[in-house]
Image (spheres, grey):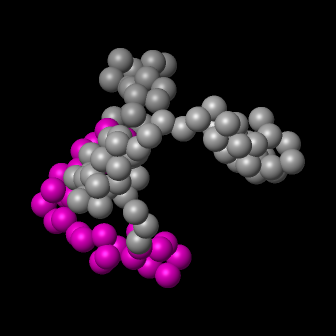
């Protein structure tokens, strides 16, 4: 027996996921929590420098330190072919082994 009101496979799960994401966003807007209040012994509070991915992908406001570093990189002289080759040989590639550069 097939009821026309029965959701298709996965439709209900998809609907619940959408509602859960919308609720998380809504609650986050109503009750913002500073990152330092969210820390636990197993999750370390971010203490490092801001990364480009955080500014571009996570829409973080760039810090003054980040903007200064970005400006210094823009104004830095280009690296020579020899320097690029030296850095490539030291990097070690995907396996982290400098003896087998990529």
Residue 102 or residue 77, whichever sits in front: 77
Instruction: Look at the image and say whether residue 24 sits in the magenta stretch.
Output: yes
Which residue is found at the position 71% from the left and 47% from the top?
91
What is the magenta segment's predominant secondary structure? helix
Q: Nearer the viewer, residue 100 or 45?
A: 100
Q: Position of residue 36 (x, y in %)?
A: 31, 76
| Vertical arrangement, residue 66 with respect to residue 35, above or below | above
Residue at the image point whose x is 23% and y is 69% from the top: 33
Instruction: Find the residue positioned furthest to the left.
Output: 30
Q: Is residue 64 above or below residue 72?
A: below
Q: Residue furthest bottom?
A: 41
Q: Is residue 42 left or right of residue 27?
A: right
99 on left or right of 26: right
Which quadrant of the structure image shows residue 34? Answer: bottom left
Q: Is residue 38 above or below residue 83?
A: below
Report the magenta residues as a range: 17-46
Q: Foreground: 5 or 59?
A: 59
Q: Per the image, is 86 magenta?
A: no
Q: Is residue 91 visible?
A: yes
Q: Residue at x 27, y 52 (%)?
A: 67
Residue at 48% x, 26% y is 9
Q: Using the rendered view, name the quadrant where residue 63 is placed.
A: bottom left
Q: How many marks?
A: 0
- Horizontal and vertical percent for residue 74? 35, 41
**In the picture, residue 18 is in which quadrant?**
top left
Q: Along the horizontal axis of the image, is 17 left or right of 22?
A: right
Q: Nearer the viewer, residue 101 or 17?
A: 101
Instruction: Tell me where residue 69 appears, x and y as whole percent.
Output: 35, 54
Left or right of 90? Residue 41 is: left
Residue 3: x and y in percent read: 39, 21
Whether residue 58 is visible to the viewer of this picture, yes or no, is: no
Q: Quadrant of the C terminus?
A: top right
């Amino acid at each position: 027996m097939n009821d026309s009101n029965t959701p298709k496979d996965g439709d209900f799960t998809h609907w619940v996921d959408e509602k859960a994401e919308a609720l998380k966003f809504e609650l986050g807007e109503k009750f913002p929590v500073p990152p330092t209040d969210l820390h636990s012994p197993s999750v370390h509070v971010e203490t490092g420098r801001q990364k480009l991915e955080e500014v571009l992908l996570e829409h973080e406001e760039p810090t003054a330190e980040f903007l200064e570093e970005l400006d210094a990189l823009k104004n830095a002289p280009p690296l020579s072919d020899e320097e690029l080759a030296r850095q490539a040989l030291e990097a070690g590639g995907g396996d982290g082994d400098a003896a087998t550069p990529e």
